[in-house]
Image (spheres, helix red, strand yellow):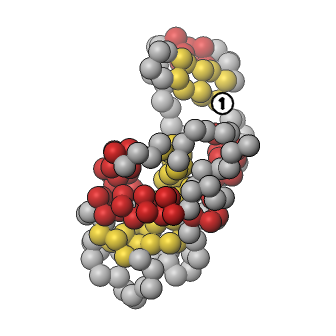
Amino acid sequence: MSQTPPILGFVAFSGTGKTTLLTRVIPLLREAGLRVALIKHAHHQFDIDTPGKDSYRLRQAGAEHVMIASRGRWVWMAETPGQQEARLDEMLARLGELDVDLILIEGFKHERYPKIELRRSELDNPRLYPEDQDIIAVASDGPLEPPTQLPQLDLNDPAAIATFIVDRVRGDRGTQPEAVA
């Protein structure tokens, strides 16, 4: 039985640029030979289906689970009325045994797992470090106040962030997610 791939998250308050950074880092991780999966947390209702399309109409008709499959991709949508906020451990369990080297997480900032905190100097958001002991590095566009002993990454240098991640994953291959830090 294979072990769970390492997990690493990017956490920050809304508007800090988590998705933008990930769209720049993921191709670099792929170029480095890593197979990547991603879980993104949404704080609001969302729909990836298009009104009027067959899958949308079937879901609206009452199908609780809809899988759409083609030659190049598949997606599984599940209706979860009345469910509490999604939990990271539940989402990881649903991924099952994936053939990936790394699972990236965007969000779920209050859950326990290794994270990189993103900070933008023009935003006056509360910091998550040092209170969150799961933060393993801080990516910022300026100096941190107060300073930290954690590794500091340049938020505007996706290549350096990707190198940091690759080094950690390759150094921790075959370990449980908690050991990525």
Using the image, determine if residue 49 lies above or below residue 52. below
- Residue 159 location, x and y as percent? 29, 58
Question: Is residue 96 visible to us here?
Answer: yes
Given residues 152 and 100, the one toward you in this image is 100
Q: Which residue is mark 1?
A: 79
- Residue 87 location, x and y as percent? 66, 51
- Residue 69 location, x and y as percent? 54, 17
Q: Which residue lies at the image location 56% right of the left edge and 62% below the top edge?
A: 172
Mark 1 crowd level (few <14, some 14–19, many ≥20, 10 Å Cα): few
Q: Which residue lies at the image location 66% right of the left edge and 30% below the top edge?
A: 79
Using the image, determine if residue 146 lies above or below residue 63. below
Given residues 97 and 145, the one toward you in this image is 97
Question: Is residue 11 visible to us here?
Answer: no
Using the image, determine if residue 104 lies above or below residue 119. above
Quarter holding the C terminus is bottom right
- Residue 178 location, x and y as percent? 64, 64
Q: Which residue lies at the image location 44% right of the left edge and 20% below the top edge?
A: 72
Given residues 153 and 90, the one toward you in this image is 153
User: Among all residues in the image, which is located at the extreme bottom?
Assistant: 146
Q: Which residue lies at the image location 49% right of the left edge and 15% below the top edge?
A: 70
At label 1, the amino acid type is Glu
User: Among all residues in the image, which is located at the extreme top?
Assistant: 54
Quarter holding the N terminus is top right
* Secondary-structure class at tag 1: loop
174 displayed left or right of 22: right
